[in-house]
């Protein structure tokens, strides 16, 4: 027992001496060197967090637009084998009666063809300037209050309740916005705000004036055309008010799953499919999101290895250049553990400073800055995703890697023969 | 206090083996001030490294205060250096980022003393060798003589049984060397056992006993009649 107590006391003394030596060494080392090491550690930490954050944020930006411009928090859609949501009005009433629902919007959806040069095309053999896609019938006021659709108008203006002959075109139907060639992809050429287009749905035709062009970087907006709900109902002859999509916007901090459960309990699922916004994400988006997450982790792991090597080199050079003094300290009876601990404490100091400065930069500048100035990627406005628990895990990993990377070179040098170290052999 | 029996130490040099100590035996009594002299390469520093538990001889025995140190583990030898021995190196061997007092108090802290007690003891040690005014100076702010005195203060602070000094005046001018030697003689008068390696006979003559090494062997071991 006494032996264990003595060992413990010696260990405690080694820690205290190690801390004393580390503190003095850091305090009296060159400020420029300390700043450089801390700077490298800060960059390493940011590399760990930001690279993954941008990759995930790239998709997060896309899913955020999907949620805010289209799905809302809970999305109710038609059952796979139905053409529309039966008893739509009753479902809307049920949804509106739920205490968590702040707003909702509904849409009628039909596939149709839109043609631009129907008036100027001389021969029927000439190629029609047309394309096909989804046409959404919306209540413009309701839609705008729920999804802020008007903010995506890049040319022209948004629909009003009186615009029964107007249409908004998603930018991805227009060649000048989506200049790509792909098999089966036909785009409208030279269509501008004020031009007339003809929409054909199931043999019914109507002429519209292009009132605006929408661009949101979400396919659910950019690959759709929008007209008034009443206009579309008339065009397709639907008088039952059964809609195809209902998007619910919930009060802040409401868990979408709670609302989904409430809707399921009201048997809404007998006539419609109820999904939270993330469940309704297109599969390819989920796949890319998961892929980017894995990519982020791989890059993060490489960053961690780079960080470990960096601190290993820093501590190794530090220990090698101070080999003689390590020998002297051992020569006057300082325990090897105290010396190893001194280097581990220094590693912890450099890593902690790097992490703290990195955290301050991350949450004090980078995250808010990128949130207000999203990175403009072709298919999304990327944000920087840095969830606090995830960041803390990475900080802890970096710290652990640093402790190991600081300990190994210190141990290598401290283990050398005392006399050889003193004499510089 | 010290008993050395037939110490042999050799180094490999390519295919050949160079014998630096060839069966050295002697003993040192408590309170003695012994100098070990000899020409460069005679083996005097190597002998001191063996006595100071910094190196292992190939064979032979070294007893310090009844303990056979050649058989001790690495850890026990470190403990021995910390508890019982004081070592003064030729080139002062101070830690550059520690002030004079911090250099002295580190081994005291390692002995488990709290910082206040070790600071008091370190200060007393520095006062003893006349360096009380420069306690907070870094080694780079001290002259060679002052640095060597800090090294002496570090060696005596924990009240070791024996002090080993390896050419303590080698890098000092004559005036400073004399001051350092004065420190040693005063410590010895207080009963401190000292073994000092020097190649300067003038300083060796100030000690109680002069052991002369030549080619790894003791060629003379004489009591100094002047003291």
Image (spheres, helix red, strand yellow):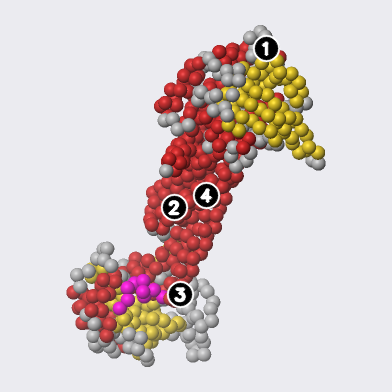
Instruction: Please report the residue visible at 49 percent of the width from the left and 65 percent of the height from the top.
Output: A294
**Residue A367 seen by the camera:** yes
**Residue A422 seen by the camera:** no
Q: Mark 2: which secondary structure?
A: helix
Q: Mark 3 sits on what residue?
A: A284
Q: First in sequence, mark 4 or 3: give its number.
A: 3
Kindly check if marks 2 and 1 are in contact, taking CB atoms under 8 A apart as contact. no
Instruction: Please report the residue visible at 46 percent of the width from the left and 65 percent of the height from the top.
Output: A293
Instruction: Please report the residue visible at 68 percent of the width from the left and 29 percent of the height from the top.
Output: B5
- Magenta part, dominant SS: loop
- Residue in front for this viewpoint, A313 or A330: A330
- Residue A276 is a magenta residue: yes
Q: Mark 1 sits on what residue?
A: B224
Q: Mark 4 sits on what residue?
A: A404
Kindly report which numbered mark, 4 or 1, lies closer to the viewer in this rendering. Answer: 1
Magenta region: which residues? A274-282
The C terminus of chain B: image quadrant: top right
- Residue A258 is a magenta residue: no
């Amino acid at each position: 027992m006494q032996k264990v107590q003595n060992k413990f006391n010696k260990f405690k003394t080694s820690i205290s001496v190690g801390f004393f030596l580390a503190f003095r060494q850091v305090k009296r080392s060159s400020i420029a060197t300390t700043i450089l090491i801390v700077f490298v550690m800060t960059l390493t930490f940011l590399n760990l967090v930001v690279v993954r954050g941008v990759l995930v944020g790239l998709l997060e930006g896309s899913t955020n637009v999907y949620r805010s411009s289209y799905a809302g928090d809970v999305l109710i859609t038609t059952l796979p084998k139905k053409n529309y949501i039966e008893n739509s009005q009753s479902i809307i009433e049920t949804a509106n009666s739920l205490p968590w629902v702040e707003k909702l919007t509904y849409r009628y959806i039909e596939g149709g063809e839109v043609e631009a040069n129907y008036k100027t095309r001389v021969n029927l053999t000439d190629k029609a300037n047309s394309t096909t896609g989804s046409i959404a019938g919306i209540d413009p006021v309701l839609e705008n209050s729920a999804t802020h659709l008007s903010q995506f108008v890049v040319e022209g203006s948004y629909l009003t309740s009186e615009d029964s002959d107007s249409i908004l075109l998603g930018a991805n139907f227009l060649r000048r916005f989506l200049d790509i060639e792909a098999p089966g992809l036909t785009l409208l050429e030279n269509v501008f705000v004020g031009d007339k287009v003809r929409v054909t749905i199931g043999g019914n035709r109507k002429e519209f004036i292009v009132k605006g062009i929408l661009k949101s970087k979400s396919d659910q907006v950019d690959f759709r055309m929008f007209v008034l709900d009443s206009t579309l109902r008339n065009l397709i002859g639907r008088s039952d008010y059964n809609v195809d999509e209902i998007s619910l916007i919930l009060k802040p901090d409401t868990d979408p799953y709670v609302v989904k459960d409430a809707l399921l309990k009201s048997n809404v699922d007998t006539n419609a499919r109820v999904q939270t916004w993330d469940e309704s994400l297109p599969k390819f988006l989920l796949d890319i999101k998961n892929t980017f997450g894995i990519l982020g982790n791989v890059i993060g792991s490489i960053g961690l290895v780079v960080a470990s090597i960096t601190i290993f080199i820093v501590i190794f050079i530090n220990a090698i250049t101070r080999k003689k003094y390590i020998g002297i300290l051992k020569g006057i009876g300082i325990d090897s553990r105290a010396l190893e601990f001194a280097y581990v404490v220094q590693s912890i100091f450099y890593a902690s400073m790097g992490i703290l400065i990195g955290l301050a930069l991350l949450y004090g500048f980078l995250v808010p800055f990128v949130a207000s100035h999203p990175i403009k990627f072709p298919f999304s406005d990327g944000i920087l995703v840095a969830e606090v628990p995830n960041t803390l895990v990475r900080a802890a990993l970096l710290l652990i890697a640093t402790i190991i990377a600081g300990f190994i070179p210190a141990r290598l040098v401290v283990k050398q023969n005392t006399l050889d170290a003193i004499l510089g052999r | 206090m010290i008993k050395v029996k037939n110490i042999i130490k050799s180094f490999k040099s390519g295919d050949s083996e160079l014998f630096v100590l060839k069966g050295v035996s002697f003993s040192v009594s408590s309170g003695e001030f012994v100098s070990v002299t000899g020409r460069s390469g005679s083996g005097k520093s190597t002998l001191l490294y063996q006595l100071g538990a910094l190196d292992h001889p190939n064979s032979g025995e070294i007893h310090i205060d009844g303990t056979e140190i050649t058989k001790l583990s690495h850890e026990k030898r470190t403990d021995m250096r910390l508890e019982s021995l004081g070592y003064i190196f030729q080139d002062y061997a101070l830690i550059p980022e520690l002030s004079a007092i911090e250099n002295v108090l580190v081994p005291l802290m390692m002995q488990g003393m709290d910082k206040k007690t070790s600071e008091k003891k370190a200060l007393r040690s520095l006062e003893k060798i006349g360096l009380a005014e420069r306690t907070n100076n870094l080694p780079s702010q001290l002259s060679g003589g002052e640095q060597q005195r800090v090294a002496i203060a570090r060696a005596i602070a924990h009240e070791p049984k024996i002090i080993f000094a390896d050419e303590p005046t080698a890098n000092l001018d004559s005036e400073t060397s004399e001051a350092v030697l004065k420190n040693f003689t005063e410590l010895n008068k207080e009963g401190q056992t000292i073994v000092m390696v020097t190649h300067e006979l003038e300083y060796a003559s100030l000690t109680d006993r002069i052991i002369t090494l030549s080619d790894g062997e003791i060629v003379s071991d004489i009591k100094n009649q002047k003291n």
